[in-house]
Amino acid sequence: MSAFLTQYAFLIVPIVKIAILVFIVLTVDAYLTWIERKVIAHIQARWGPHRVGPHGLLQPLADGLKFIFKEDPIPAHVDKVAYFLAPFITLMLALTSLAVIPFGPQQFTVFGYRTGIGIAEVNISLMVLFAITALAVYGVALAGWASNSKYSLLGGLRSSAQMISYELALTLSVVGVLLIAGSFSLREIIVKQGNPHLGLLGWNFFGFSSETVAFTQIIGFLCFYIAAIAETNRVPFDLPEAESELVAGFHTEYASMKFAMFFIAEYTSMITISCLATILFFGGWLSPFPTTPFWHFTFYLPSVMLIPLGLWVIFDGMRYETVFGRIVLPGVGSVMVAIGAALIVFPVVNDNIQGVFWFLAKVFTFLFVYVWMRGTLPRFRYDQLMSFGWKFLLPVSIANVILTSAVILWRMH
Amino acid sequence: MSNPILENLWIIPLLPLLGSAVNGLFGAKWPNRTVSAVALSSTGLSFACALEAVREFLGYYEQNHQAFVKPFFDWILVPGHFRAGFDLQMDQLTVVMVLVVTGVGFLIHIYSTGYMAHEGGYYRFFSYLNLFMFFMLILVLAANFVLMFVGWEGVGLCSYLLIGFYFLRKSATNAGNKAFIVNRIGDFGFMLGMFLLFRTFHSLDFHTPDLKGVFDQAAHLPADAMGQFGTLTIACLLLFVGATGKSAQLPLYVWLPDAMEGPTPVSALIHAATMVTAGVYMVARSNVLFTHSPTAMYVVAIVGCATAFFAATIGLVQSDIKKVLAYSTVSQLGYMFLGCGVGAFTAGIFHLMTHAFFKALLFLSAGSVIHAVGGEQDMWKMGGLWSKIKVTAWCMLFGTIAIAGFPPFAAFFSKDAILFSTYNYGYNGKVLYGVGLFAAILTSFYMFRLVRLTFFTQPRYDEHHVHVHESPGSMTVPLMVLAFLSLTGGWFALPALFGGKDYFANFLAPVFAAAAETGGAESAQLEHILSVVAVVAATVGLLVALRMYRGKVSEGKSEGLHKLLYNKYYVDEIYQALIVGPLVWMSRNILWKVVDVGMIDGTVNGIADGSRAIGDTVRHTQSGNTRSYAVWVLVGALVLAAIIFWPVLHPALFGGVR
Amino acid sequence: MSAALVIFFALAALAVIGSISLIIQREPIHSALSLIVVMVALAGLYLLMGAEFVAAVQIIVYGGAIMVLFVFVIMLLNAGEEERTNFSKLATFAGIPLALAVTGFIAAAIVHSSGALPAAMPKGALTDTRTLSTLLFSDFVYPFELTSFMILIAILGAIVLAQREN
Amino acid sequence: MVPTNYYLILSAILFGLGIIAFVFKRNIIAIFMAIELMLNAVNLAFVAFSQSLGKVDGEVFVLFVIVVAAAEAAVGLGIIIMTARTRRTLNVERADLLKL
């Protein structure tokens, strides 16, 4: 049995990990929608989803059920193959792109198969990531074209044009980071940003990781993030699904599960982009504090955050109007408190949790920024979008490349 | 470097080339002053360089007794087989030629600035003139036949350009063409001679350090006997054909009189002083070869002598002042060849030099006269100019006396030397001497006739239109200089009168070492007798001329012998009938009508029609259907693949069969 | 039958099937999709060979840019089903045989001459991107610059063509 | 590992299929795709050779080929759009003005 395991570990272990990751990601997606609606609601001084479950916590579940049981009409005269293919392509690519992202520093061996947190670590993982995002155009384009409706077609054309245009800026804005790291491997990039004494100043965003080969990538980050938002068709670049003009853009003609696929894909790509931003510019799993013994107390930050939060949830849940809420919320809160306490009790676990903790913290910050933007910013006009992408973003990112390389050269000599 | 100029000999020809290039390229817009400044400075500098080079060469010769040869770069190089380099050499002969060319050339440049002042194409004229200087210097400085031939052709080209300088005049262009074409015949001979030499000696250098040069090898060959046509004899004769072409000897002299269509300075520089003497120079330069074939020498002598007499007779009756001088030039050149032919190369070159002086003088004076009477060249429309243009007249008189051979003027010594050697010449020396002497009489006759008709006797031009005036200083000064030279030019040979060997001969001795023994036994008093005879002959000519042309003279109607001479023995007409006519007929009726129209055009048109016919049939494959084109591409690909892979696949596919 | 061989045959089959469907599909968009499949399969083969950078570029440029352009144009012109006309007799009768002949030639030549090659891939010959880029910017720098110029010209040409109509 | 010949033969097959598509297809865009397919086949051969010979040059060539293909696509598709607009058809057999 174990022999079998050791022989085919290179197949089994990834499959297991994929299963786990997909489960987690889907959940996160689901609750991301909840968070988004809540946050926007509060920005707009509303309550947001509040009916299903305490604080609407079960809303995603209800949505999922609705998606599944909705009827699935197929419009007339659609190109069947493309019509069915489109959502699958989109979702598949969105999920695949998560495969190369390392969520934590640890590397361990299962059945003699060495692996890390995260599914695969190719040494050109960044290239792979871009390759996958490059393919993501097809889903949208095909969906728009296949569903044989003018709204969809316009949406599809728009979004694919937009994606192609901003992909250039996206890729170029990363070159600075590559120059600093000298590698395509995300792990490499993160490790290069580590600076035992300066902590977060070592991140590429500030760029003090090394005396010679480092330069602040603020410009690069801004270009990257703007282009990324455009890539994911989010506000203020959400013209492909501009409700006011195109009903719902390229997925107007899609319903139920197929629509859900587009939906999930969009949020998954949001996550991917956030991870990428974290890794490339904000030091991935690195803690913002120096690693000198003096700063060791920061290791307790997770529990210090979790325990009060849990306590607050408990007390808040006690005074909740529905019975169900009065049962569930304290339970959740006590689980949080328990985890926090456990972390304090078992330092080993605590030490290993740090990387993942910081990683997720940063990622969620970026996700929040996404939502925040959607709540605040208006939408671009299409010509503005294009001219902005080609005439501003692209030149700026090229300038960033030149600047960075010049500075590095100058510092080397 | 001890010899700055000598080591960089190329600078001497280069300067005129630069002048020519500058004037030719930019001169069109410039004022005459600038153009003449460029031209004069270039030639003047080159003259100065020549002087310096000569000085250095003499010093060089003191140390190592041999000619100075320096290769500058390879021009044509077939390793192991053939090398024609840009090699320049300097020896005594070259010294004489270089000094004559640059010196006289410089003077004539100065003269031209005055003479051409009111002509169109001023810059063009000087550009050509400088170019001519360049080629002439290349010709005399060359250290191998090929480079020499370059100069040879180059001067031919310049002569053509300058004869046809007034290219709006049909006669001028015709004369230019004539000169060029006639020269082609000679050049053909020259080239054949070169080829023969190369075939014999596998080299065309004159002298080489490893003694592989033509002359080095020829010196050790046995000389041909009289009347034996060995390789050397044939080569010499071929070279001499070239010489006759360039130096206007029988039978190729016909171009020179027509060449007088060119501006007078050109006639003076090219067709009297320098270019036409190239043939003589060439013969003298290859004296080693000629001394090895008495036959060739004999031919040279006879041709020279005949030309001297023949041209002199024609000169007797010409009415165009320049024509007279032209025929006199031909005749003098004949003298030079006579000298070379009888083995007195020194005398020949000596006469070449003196002739350069006095003939240039004569031409320039003639130009000055023409200038004075407003472009009139016919002596029958002149007369009585003596009092009006004294300077010119005196210079002309100097030149005349010089050419006539009165002591102590130049030609006395040179011509005397030639006649003396002729007298001593082994084969019919006396006959040749007699003819030469008679030619001398004729010479002095027609020259004094010219002087009489021009300056004395009563005026025959109408004073109303022509107002005679002396030429500007720029023209008269060179005249005086040349007059002085033609007076003193011969004094090198002064000691010869008193039995000694003259300086000039001594100076040139090393070059003509091979020819030394053919000088013949000399005895002082025989020489005295002969020179007295020569003077007497000159006097006879003078007296006859004075007797015939005095007071009122008029151009009588010519008949009989006079008519024959006046029409130059109808030589041009004969050539026209015998050679040119048939040639033209053949080229029109055979080459043009049959070969060109029939064959060549036929072929071209045939090809054109054929391709059109093919196109008519093939064009149907062009269906305009892209897929068919794609298939055609495939066919091409298949063919290519077959060609490329066949050697690979042949064994692979069919290896099993065998 | 090692895992590598399995993957190879899987990808090869994918590529061949893709190209066949490129031929037999009548809808241009389907042809384009099958071509994309072929390209992805080829990228996989590159990865299998260890040319990971080329694989990535293959997908990014070919898959992400060029084929997107194709799909774009197909959408723009709304290219419908292709009509199987047979105006060109030549192509109808001689086309396929000739194509097969050329292919046969090439294949035969390859099979024959590839005996000179090392029979199998050097184990784990993973061309790392650094050497590739070094080569690209040292030995091939002039071709590189030239291609950059060429692509610039191509951009200009495309712009001119696009602007022609208005 | 996989023998080099396999890759080469595969590339030959793909090339042949490309040729067949080139002559078989009528749609101008499809023909263009066939050309791309041939290019890819050649690329495969390049990479295979470079890997088996252990020289990176082949891969550099592949990069060049890809760049050229990109440029070609940019211009070619522009031309295709123009022709489609003027000729009102994508069938190469109907756009046959290129004859007498």
Image (cartoon, helix red, strand yellow):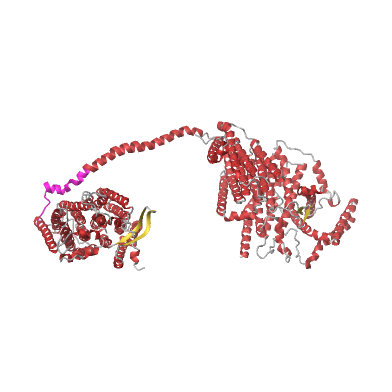
Residue B52: percent from left, percent from top: 30, 66
Q: Nearer the viewer, residue B216 or B152?
A: B216
Residue B376 seen anywhere in this rendered image of the structure: no
The one nearer the camera, A90 or B446, is: B446
Res B301 seen here: yes
- Left or right side of B439 for A216: right
Residue A144 placement (x, y as % from top left) = 69, 42
Q: Where on the picture, by quarter, is residue A336? A: bottom right
Residue B183 in the image: x percent, y percent? 26, 50
Q: Nearer the viewer, residue B429 or C20?
A: B429
Q: Is residue C34 above or below residue B106?
A: above
Query: What range is drawn magenta here?
Result: B549-576
Q: Is residue B273 left or right of residue B82?
A: left
Residue B569 falls inside the magenta stretch: yes
- Asked if A16 appears above or below B600 in the picture, the reply is below
- In the displayed structure, B385 sits above or below B584; it is below
- Asked which quadrant contains residue B118, the reply is bottom left
In what quadrant of the picture does the C terminus of chain B appear? top right
Residue B41: in magenta span: no
